[in-house]
């Protein structure tokens, strides 16, 4: 399984699950299954297109793997928004852009929390480096 930490203007995209019922109302990094013949990065771009209606580019893998259920492990990549405006098309009913200080405003799925924390740490470091240049 792949998850996408979609980044735009120093913000992270969070998606609220609408299905299955056990996960409904919780927030996650959007993504899904890697199909036969796909690289994880190709699967990520395809899944984000299907779920959000946007074109993205996979950037870098977030260290770590998180077990979702037996036989399914989540791996997360950062992704940049190439074109389109994200919309909740599949498996989600709401999307929110979050700044690093807003990370705790949503109820993240447990397996997404470590990756989200790392992405937010990187966003803070990047913003600090950019401010230091000016």
Image: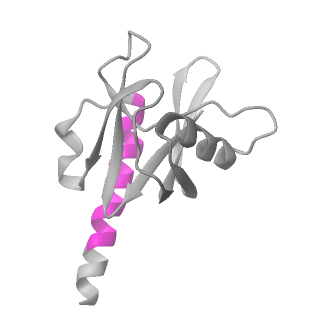
Q: Is 123 part of what is drawn in magenta?
A: yes
The extreme top residue here reads 21
Tell me the residue at 27%/64% (across/down): 124
Q: Quadrant of residue 93?
A: top left
In the depicted structure, whether residue 134 falls above or below residue 43 = below
Q: Is residue 64 left or right of residue 116?
A: right
| Residue 25 in sight | yes
Asked which colour scheme the image uses, the reply is one colour
Q: Quarter of the image containing the N terminus?
A: top right
Q: Quadrant of residue 99?
A: bottom left
Q: Quarter of the image containing the C terminus?
A: bottom left
Q: Which residues are magenta?
A: 111-127
In percent of width and height, residue 44 lies at: 60, 43
In percent of width and height, residue 101 lies at: 18, 53
| Residue 109 in sight | no
Q: Nearer the viewer, residue 73 or 12?
A: 12
Q: Nearer the viewer, residue 106 or 119?
A: 106
Q: Is residue 48 left or right of residue 92?
A: right
Q: Quadrant of residue 86?
A: top left
Q: Nearer the viewer, residue 127 or 63?
A: 127
In percent of width and height, residue 28 lies at: 38, 33
In the depicted structure, whether residue 113 falls above or below residue 83 = above
Tell me the residue at 43%/51% (across/down): 6
Q: Is residue 103 left or right of residue 22?
A: left
In the depicted structure, whether residue 91 falls above or below residue 80 = above
């Amino acid at each position: 399984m792949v998850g996408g930490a979609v980044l735009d203007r120093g913000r992270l995209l969070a998606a609220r699950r609408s299905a299955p019922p056990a996960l409904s109302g919780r927030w996650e990094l959007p993504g899904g299954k890697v199909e036969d013949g796909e690289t994880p990065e190709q699967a990520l771009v395809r899944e984000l297109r299907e779920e959000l209606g946007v074109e993205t580019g996979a950037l870098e893998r977030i260290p770590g793997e998180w077990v979702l259920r037996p036989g399914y492990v989540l791996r997360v990549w950062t992704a940049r928004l190439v074109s389109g405006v994200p919309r909740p098309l599949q498996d989600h009913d709401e999307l929110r852009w979050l700044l690093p200080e807003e990370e705790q405003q949503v109820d993240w799925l447990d397996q997404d929390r470590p990756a989200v924390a790392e992405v937010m740490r990187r966003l803070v470091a990047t913003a600090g480096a950019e401010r230091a240049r000016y």
